[in-house]
Amino acid sequence: MEKYLQVFKTKLKDALEYRFDLLFGAFTQLVSLAAVLILWTAVYRQAPVLGGFTYPEMVAYFLVARAVQGLLWVGLPTEMEKEIKDGLLSRYLLMPISYLGYWLWGEMAEKLVGVGVTLLFFGLLAFLLRHRFAFQTDPLLLLLFALSVALAFFINFFLTFTVGLSAFWISEIWSVSFTKDMLHEFLSGGVFPLALLPPLLAKGAMALPFAYCVYFPVEIYLGRLGPSQLLRGFGMQVLWVPLRACLAGLAWRVGLRKYEAVGA
């Protein structure tokens, strides 16, 4: 555990040095957020409620969804592809730590800094839009929301790590990574709430891990879920975390057999 804590500390120090880059990256989302706000403002002029969402709830949905997406984003595939293709993976094989553990603890350190930046940026936006934003004040729901985001991080991390490992078998993983990102964007509820989908499609989306990365946490924040729905949602998250971890571990073991280190 001590060696992983050292990785955590090192990555945390690096992330703190680039905290202003993270803040600048957050502000680059202003244009897209403004476009979404204008769009939904126009839509709600035609009807006060859409898919069970009031206008303040929809504004809150998109701001909180964007915040969650920012916290979940993991840029592993490109770095992993380079290390696998260039033979740099060999150095990790000589270390007394696992490759997966190295990246997991590093990402957790970066997200610790990201939480502060995200709360600052999106908290400011929520304040500026306070007359249009549905604030959640229930401490229990806020605690459950934070727990669901933490579980969502692990689901997304293990899925993204598995995508990065596809470099063992294919020469360019950009298409795989892009496809995963697009599926995540739409099926997680990042583009629009899954409640707006036709019932059959919504039910299908809720059977996949993506929905429990964004849609489920945001629904908790908005207080739209009853006790049975909360139990089912957390049950699905608790199911997907070890399942995705096992699949990532399996892909690593199989891929490592195929690995031919350059210059090893």
Image (tube, helix red, strand yellow):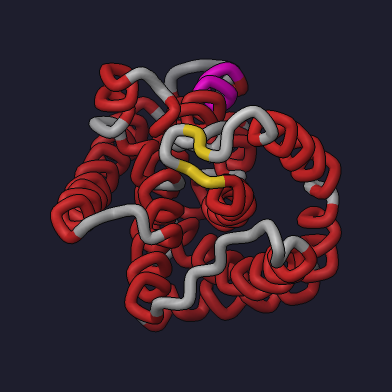
160 or 206, nearer to the observer: 206
Q: Position of residue 218 (x, y in %)?
A: 45, 53
125 or 72, nearer to the observer: 125
Main SS, magenta region, reads helix
* Residue at horizontal 49 percent and vertical 70 percent from the top: 136
* Number of numbered markers: 0
Whether residue 166 is visible: yes
The residue segment tinted magenta is 175-179
Residue 127 vs residue 224: left or right?
right
Reply above or below: 152 against 259.
Answer: below
Q: Position of residue 19 (x, y in %)?
A: 77, 70
* Residue at horizontal 24 percent and vertical 31 percent from the top: 207
Q: Quadrant of residue 177?
A: top right
Is 235 contained in the magenta span? Answer: no
Whether residue 262 is visible: no
Q: Position of residue 9 (x, y in %)?
A: 57, 80
18 or 208, nearer to the observer: 208
Reply above or below: 93 against 33.
Answer: below
Quarter of the image that includes the N terminus:
bottom left
Is 177 contained in the magenta span? Answer: yes
Q: Position of residue 257 (x, y in %)?
A: 31, 31
Residue 202 vs residue 263: left or right?
left
Q: Quadrant of residue 84?
A: top right
* Residue at horizontal 42 percent and vertical 40 percent from the top: 52
Reply above or below: 42 against 158.
Answer: above
* Residue at horizontal 74 percent and vertical 42 percent from the top: 37
Reply above or below: 191 against 104.
Answer: above
